[in-house]
Image (cartoon, grey):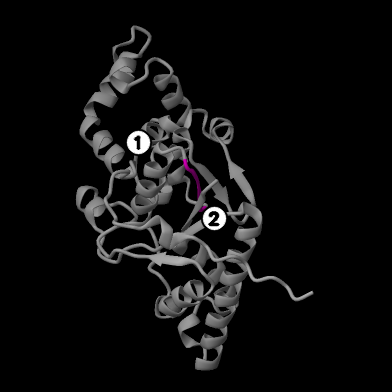
């Protein structure tokens, strides 16, 4: 059976790079050229080891590393504070990305980048399309933004915890089903993406409200919904809609990818 592994490339690479950069913080730009090259070489080595480990742990037949497009701004245009709290990519790593992509390709892992698209939307679109055809898909990332896709028969794998994240994991951690996460984060806020949420509405209040109906409209019209809370949510209606739009992954992008091109080569056999 086909099994496609979609790797959130920068999520993986930035974590691996941070391990190499940490000894030189807070002034990595002052390291020597030789040290810069050593950091890059070590990151590349760790990336290739991580990819090999994923082949062993997930046994994919197909794989794709998806990189963020540099010009994707539609979420920031709709919600200017979106990801405004994130540090820019370190210059050393930005310069090394082409070499890292090349190394991955040399080991049979196809890479994809479209400068107008976020990796999250690319991954969500590919995964959703294949899952509709009952194909097996695993997303490799520590980004919780992929968790809403679990309700569509898609797996999410944390490569650092080496853990498959399930709907039960989501329920235990957040108190809701995967398909309810975007609504929850739109109410409580999402610090990872710098989404403020509704002031004064924490997880407990949000969960109590969401328990009153399948949609916010249903919940607000429920007789048990407190008037003060109802008024607050209604006054923040436009912001909540905006938050839900930017936190919802696009799942219908037409990317023109050929699945056959993503097939992994057979692993080389060790000489006997």
Question: Which of these two is toward me, 95 or 105?
Answer: 105
Numbered badge on residue 61:
2
Q: Is residue 4 magenta?
A: no
- Rounded to the nearest angstrom, the CA distance separating label 1 from label 2 is 37 Å
Residue 84 visible? The answer is no
Relative to 120, does residue 96 appear above or below in the rendering? below
Q: Give me the residue at 28% from left, 49% from top.
A: 253
In the image, is residue 138 part of the stretch drawn in magenta? Answer: yes
Instruction: Look at the numbered disc 1 and give the secondary structure of its residue.
Output: helix
Tell me: residue 49, above or below residue 246.
below
Give neighbour class at mark 2: few <14, some 14-19, many 20+ (Cα, 10 Å): some
Please determine whether, in this image, residue 122 is positioned above or below residue 13: above
- Which residue appears farthest toward the front when viewing the image? 272
Q: Nearer the viewer, mark 1 or mark 2?
A: 2
Residue 204 image point, x, y percent: 48, 26
Residue 207 visible in the snapshot: yes
- Asked whether, in this view, residue 176 is left or right of residue 248, the answer is right
Would residue 247 be found to the left or right of residue 12 on screen? left
């Amino acid at each position: 059976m086909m099994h496609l592994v979609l790797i959130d490339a920068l999520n993986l690479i930035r974590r691996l790079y941070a391990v190499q950069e940490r000894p030189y913080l807070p002034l990595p730009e002052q390291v020597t050229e030789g040290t810069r090259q050593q950091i890059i070489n070590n990151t590349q080595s760790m990336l290739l080891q991580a990819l090999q480990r994923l082949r062993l742990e997930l046994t994919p037949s197909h794989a794709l590393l998806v990189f963020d497009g540099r010009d994707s701004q539609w979420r920031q245009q709709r919600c200017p504070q979106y990801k405004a709290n994130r540090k820019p990519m370190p210059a050393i790593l930005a310069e090394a990305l082409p070499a890292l992509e090349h190394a991955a390709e040399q080991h049979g892992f196809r890479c994809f980048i479209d400068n107008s698209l976020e990796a999250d939307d690319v991954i969500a679109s590919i995964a959703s399309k294949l899952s509709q055809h009952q194909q097996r898909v695993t997303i490799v990332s520590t980004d919780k933004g992929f968790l809403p896709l679990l309700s569509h028969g898609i797996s999410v794998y944390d490569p650092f915890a080496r853990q498959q994240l399930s709907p039960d994991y989501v329920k235990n951690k957040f108190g809701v089903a995967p398909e309810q996460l975007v609504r929850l984060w739109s109410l409580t806020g999402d610090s990872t993406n710098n989404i403020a949420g509704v002031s004064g509405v924490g997880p407990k209040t949000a969960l109590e409200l969401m328990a009153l109906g399948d949609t916010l409209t249903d919940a607000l019209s429920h007789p048990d919904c407190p008037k003060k809370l109802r008024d607050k949510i209604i006054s923040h209606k436009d912001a909540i809609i905006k938050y839900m739009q930017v936190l919802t992954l696009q799942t219908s992008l037409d990317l023109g990818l050929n699945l056959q091109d993503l097939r992994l080569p057979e692993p080389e056999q060790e000489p006997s």
